[in-house]
Amino acid sequence: MHASPRIYRLFAAASVTLCLAGTVHAQTYPTKPVRVVTSAPGGGVDFTARVLAQGLTAALGQQFIVDNRGGTHVSSLTVANAVPDGYTVLVQNNTLWTAPLFEKAAYSMAQLVPVVMASRSLNVLVVHPSLPVQSVKELIALAKAKPGEINYASGLVGSANFLAAELFKHMAGLNMVRISYKGGGPALTDVLAGQVKIMFATTGSVMPHVKSTRLRALAVTSAEPTPLVPGLPAVAATVPGYESLSFCGLFVPAKTAPAIIARLNEVSRKYLDSTEARERFLVSGVEAVSSTPQAFDAAIKADTGRINKVIQAVGLRLE
């Protein structure tokens, strides 16, 4: 039995109606506050989440409320399991896709869709002032003189500061003790207190403490010195070939309507390209960037491949 032309017309009309409904929904979105889930407060990811949330709030007329949910696993799983209606979104950095390379994760990248890359940053190698070193060269010499005695703070396995530290240890041939934390904020708190002596951290989170002399900055993790942190050498000046960067962006649950993703991308990019956003990020040592969802997805895949090479070179294993 063949369907009649009338049935085909009904199906076509229904399809058009659904498409129009999705478009109208995206044009009116959001009609209520949006929950912006992210990691622990105080770190670079939290900073990006708050700047982006404020920009989206102003642009869309609804509150984008930051909800700090601890480490990457908790925040990411929260959004991965959320209703895909655009009202629960995630701001996260490289840890989102690199952590599963090191340990079993409760979420899958297939459960999340990249919307826009929002910021790009480097790390700064800082030490507590009680550590008697003034340069990367002196730090390496001290660590080699005291193998297994010097500790360093690190976020979750796979986090940007974790990878920066592990690569540094490997390339410099050091034996230092890792003290693990759920996020950059809690790690920095203990470094400031002197309970842990070393950390690789985002410029925005540590430079105010460097200026107040509560921390001593030794170098940046970009391949060359950068105007983002004037006056600091690159780690690579002492450890040739060293480089470690991080980028952060917005994600939504899989199956979120494409029209909503497009709406969030459009508004986010407009704000991130503004002078206001760029200056806010720059003051904190972070570069505001923007991208299409497709470009962000490609960057994530490229970074995953790069980190896999680091895993093989360093000999890291799943925990």
Image (cartoon, helix red, strand yellow):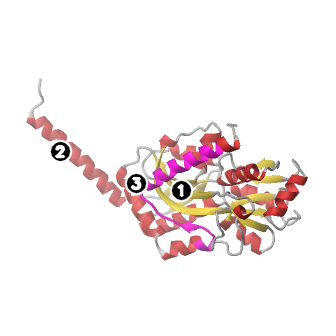
Residue tagged 3: 261
Looking at the rendered structure, the secondary structure element under dot 1 is strand
Label annotation for residue 317: none
* Cα–Cα span, label 1 and label 3: 14 Å
Q: Are marks 2 and 3 in contact (CB under 8 Å)?
A: no
161 or 113, which is in the foreground? 161
Q: Is residue 227 above or below residue 6?
A: below
Provide the residue designation for mark 1.
Answer: 36
Q: Nearer the viewer, mark 2 or mark 3?
A: 3
Residue 301 in magenta? yes
In terms of sequence position, does the residue under pointer 1 or pointer 2 come before the other? 2
Q: Percent position (x, y) of residue 216?
A: 80, 68
x and y, in percent, of residue 90 in the image: 53, 52
| Mark 2, other Cα within 10 Å: few <14 / some 14–19 / many ≥20 | few
Q: Residue furthest top?
A: 1
**Label 1 environment density (alpha carbons within 10 Å; few <14, some 14–19, many ≥20):** many
Quadrant of the image containing the N terminus: top left
Query: CA–CA distance between discs 2 and 3?
Result: 24 Å
Badge 3 crowding class, 10 Å Cα cut-off, few under 14, some 14 to 19, many 20 or more, is: some
Residue drawn at x 76%, y 68% as measured from the top left: 217
Please tell me whether residue 211 is drawn above or below residue 205 in the rendered image: below
Q: Residue beneath label 2, please?
A: 13
In x, y percent, where is residue 164?
Answer: 69, 54
Residue at the image point whose x is 55% and y is 45% from the top = 305
Residue 143 x, y percent position in the rendering: 85, 54
Magenta stretch, main secondary structure, is helix
**Tag 1 near tag 2, CB within 8 Å:** no
Relative placement, left or right, of 253 versus 220 is: left
Residue 29, quarter of picture: bottom left
126 left or right of 29 in image? right
